[in-house]
Amino acid sequence: MNIFAIVGVGVTAAAASAMLRRLHGEFGLFVSLAASAVILGAVIVSLDPLLELLGELAEETGTQSQYIGILMKALAVCVITRLASECCRDSGESAIAAKIELAGKAAVLLVAVPLFRAILGIVRGLIV
């Protein structure tokens, strides 16, 4: 990941967005959204080696791959939720941002249901 390129895109987009918001408020939001999408795409592409490493570590330690998948899905939900809520805050919609964050928390809990079931199974096995 070339952090300098990502920072350059971010700073340039922030400056362009600030200038456009003074002239036409709605266009500043579009610049911000486009820059966010580009940066998020660059980060996702750069995470491929990390995902491979996590898979290798899971195999070596005997961790079931479904649990690693659940954790990655939860992380993805968190990142997407944060990005969406910040975009809403940038456009002045704090109430919508709060609702998006609430939906993200609920989505993480739903993604984690198989983990809860596995933990309850372990607890039942220890009690009985």
Image (tube, rainbow, N blue to C red):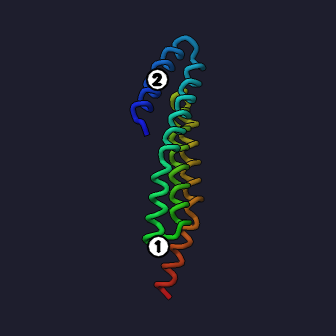
Residue holding disc 1: 62
Please say whether residue 8 is visible from this viewpoint: yes
Residue at the image point whose x is 43% and y is 64% from the top: 57
Residue type indicated by callout 1: Gly
Left or right: where does residue 39 sit relative to residue 103? left
Element at label 1: loop
Residue holding disc 2: 14
Residue type indicated by callout 2: Ala
Residue 80: x and y in percent read 55, 43
Query: In the rendered view of the protein, which quadrant contains the N terminus?
Result: top left
Residue at the image point whose x is 55% and y is 60% from the top: 69
Q: CA distance from mark 1 to mark 2?
A: 45 Å
Residue at the image point whose x is 51% and y is 59% from the top: 71
For the residues labelled 1 and 2, say whether their Cβ atoms are less than 8 Å apart.
no
Residue at the image point whose x is 51% and y is 13% from the top: 22
**Foreground residue among 5 and 85:** 5
**Foreground residue among 19 and 127:** 19
**Foreground residue among 66 and 3:** 3
Query: In the image, is residue 41 above or below residue 105?
Result: above
Query: In the image, is residue 93 above or below residue 123?
Result: above
